[in-house]
Amino acid sequence: MSRSGEDAGPAAPAGRKDARRNKEALLDAAAAVFVASGVDAPVRDIAAKAGVGLGTIYRHFPTRADLVIGVYRHQVDACADAGPALLATNSPHTALGKWINLFVDFLVTKHGLASALQADNAGSEALHAYFLDRLLPVCTELLEAAAVAGEIRPDIDAYQLMRGVGNLCIGADSDPRYDARRMTELLIAGLRRPRPTHSDRALGSGT
């Protein structure tokens, strides 16, 4: 093997890392533009936000649907990755509350996703499956940690909680008078295990 071939080996992983970072930066820019202007925003606005040329975007995402799907999966991944990080630096109940806030932000800001993908039912179903596969285990882990710590009731189902939060977010992006995050904060506060009263403690001790 030539010397140049030997040098190419270590450089390849670094090149892939750079490409991955560039793609993630592009997706972050696209997500920000979608939040501000919806999924029909001009691609040139996304390119300007990301500091890349139009060709770079089309190379990664040949169609708008590809870009929307890429942003959606990127945001799902970010929400999933945040769960363990929050749990490592907060009490379980606090971590759960902060994660639900991120989940609400994700639900409220995916402007126009359904309409952008309505022609591709199979694609929509695949995205929904990806959503559940990535986020349900994270929500389950947070709930279990909070239950083990005695901070919340032990009978909360992750799917039901996420479905309930989703229902609370319906229409939040179109009604400035409605604060979905405030409503979900009240919901999460309501999961707390009631503190025993003095009479409860007295009954428990048999006095």
Image (cartoon, rainbow, N blue to C red):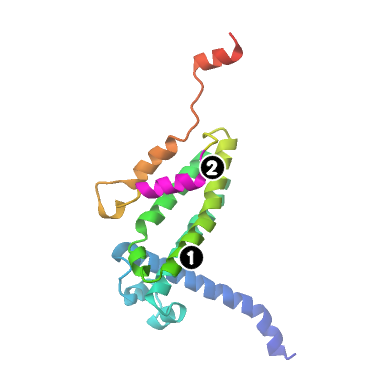
Q: Is residue 138 magenta?
A: no
List x then y, in percent, for residue 111: 33, 62
Indicate the quadrant containing the N terminus: top left, top right, bottom left or bottom right: bottom right
Which residue lies at the image location 53% right of the left edge and 36% below the top edge?
Answer: 155
List x then y, in percent, for residue 45: 32, 73
Q: Is residue 89 visible?
A: no
| Residue 59 drawn above or below residue 115 | below
Q: Main secondary structure of the magenta part?
A: helix
Q: Is residue 167 magenta?
A: yes
Numbered mark located on residue 126 in the image: 1
Q: Residue furthest top?
A: 207
Query: Which amino acid type is shown beneath numbered disc 2?
Result: Leu
Q: Is residue 100 left or right of residue 111?
A: right
**Label 2 Cα neighbours within 10 Å, binned few <14 / some 14-19 / many ≥20:** many
Nearest-to-viewer mark from 1 and 2: 1
- Local SS, label 2: helix
| Residue that badge 2 annotates | 143
Numbered mark located on residue 62 in the image: none
Q: Which residues are magenta?
A: 156-168
Q: Residue furthest front?
A: 121
| Residue 12 drawn above or below residue 190 | below
Q: Is residue 49 left or right of residue 138?
A: left
- Local SS, label 1: helix
- Could you give the CA–CA distance between mark 1 and mark 2, rounded to whole angstroms? 26 Å
Choose between 37 and 14: the one closer to the eye.
37
